[in-house]
Amino acid sequence: MTNTSRVKLVFESDGRTLELPVMQGTLGPAVVDVRSLVQHGLLTYDPGFMATASCTSCITYIDGDAGLLYYRGYPIEQLAQHSSFMEVAYLLLEGELPDAAQKLAFEQSVRQNAMLHDQINTVFRGFQRNAHPMAVMVAVTGALSAFYHESTNVFDAENRRLAALQLLGKIPTIAAMSYKYNVGDPFVYPQNRLHYVENFLHMMFSTPSGPYEVNPVLARALDKILILHADHEQNASTSTVRLTGSSGANPFACIAAGMASLWGPLHGGANEAVLKMLAEIGDVSRIPEFINRAKDKSNAFRLMGFGHRVYKNMDPRAAVMRQTCHEVLNELDLNDDPMFKIALELERIALQDEYFIAKKLYPNVDFYSGIVFRAMGIPESMFTAIFALARTAGWVAQWHEMLSDGGHRIGRPRQQYVGPTRRDYVPDRNH
């Protein structure tokens, strides 16, 4: 990042002028370095941090207007087409794609960390059976620090890598066990003979009463979903991980904090909302009614899974998910399923209707991922849990990058105080 120019801040009241450096990254908009303002008794005001760069990062680049998403410079559609989630996790963490030997060693290390300490089973059993899987995941992930003390020295690079491997290995196990506990099935332990996604599907869907064979089409579809959701720059959950980690908190607490943020319906619950909307529509014949409601500005109804607050063009992940969605529906012979018929007709209209085209309300990744999950037999309560599984790769990479920066500081956002001015306490106010 280089300083290319300076901007002047002129105060109309007294004619003072402050000069602030402008820094240019390798891609994207330039940023104004406002750190010196505090020396002049000034702060910037930016609710939601929509115009604030909270850090420098080499990991993910997004151009919402052009519809671009890069991991370490690689376009997301190329990675989804040719790579694997494990390879992408290595890329995010280490900065480069692995060679064959590095990839094998990385995958083996993740597999070796997939088992949980046996006593963690008692943590699960402290919950009611109908507890939401995300509630269980947040708690169990945070509790890992009570079992794996050797990786909590976050200021040692090797300890951070160990923690990253432990989290990448254990989060799928925790997610699958959270599901099994919720439905009352016995836990299924990870198998070192299986690849990452196959292992997760095996832990979720196999039972001791019979064999379970992982469908390779479904495994590849889920692998793509994990790649597409692995990182997304400084969103709410990633910023939460960084802010928590800036204090030196242990890695398990940081990832648990990210999960808690992701659980919010405005962040990780969008694909659940898509299925609720499809259920509300109920039949293909009712689609025109709901399309008209969506176009009516006075109507509170919104089509879920269309448009994106970041992407003002086609979400680059959605194009990949669209193809994957159709592959899964064809594999499972579900194109005649009533709910999927509604989804496919909505998709057709959105891609052809001038209203949607003009407003760039394209189907986004959440629209397709919810359909794929339902087709695979994954319940809605697990959608965000699988999102968390995927995003763990980005979270540990962002956390590691932040702590690798020798100049990192504890996060401390400021505020504009608008409360009462000084007032003195008056005793005996009732007399």
Image: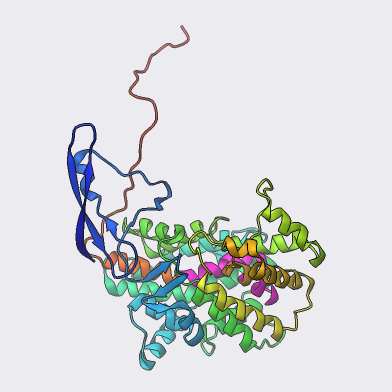
Q: How is the image coloured?
A: rainbow
Q: For the N terminus, which image quadrant? A: bottom left
The stretch drawn in magenta includes residue 23: no
Closest to the observer, 254 or 44: 44
Among the 4 quarters of the image, the one containing residue 248: bottom left
x, y percent for residue 153? 30, 66
Closest to the observer, 57 or 409: 57
Left or right of residue 261: residue 401? left
As displayed, is residue 63 above or below residue 82? above
Among the 4 quarters of the image, the one containing residue 202: bottom right
Among the 4 quarters of the image, the one containing residue 72: bottom left
Q: In this view of the protein, can residue 272 be seen by the observer? A: no
Q: Residue at x 25, y 50 (%)?
A: 34
Q: In this view of the protein, can residue 98 be seen by the observer? A: yes
x, y percent for residue 427? 39, 13
Q: Which residues are magenta?
A: 369-391
As displayed, is residue 327 above or below residue 268? below
Left or right of residue 123: residue 29? left
Q: Residue at x 33, y 69 (%)?
A: 27
Most frequent secondary structure within the magenta stretch: helix
x, y percent for residue 88? 43, 80
Q: Residue at x 46, y 82 (%)?
A: 79
Residue that protrudes farthest toward the bottom in the picture: 100
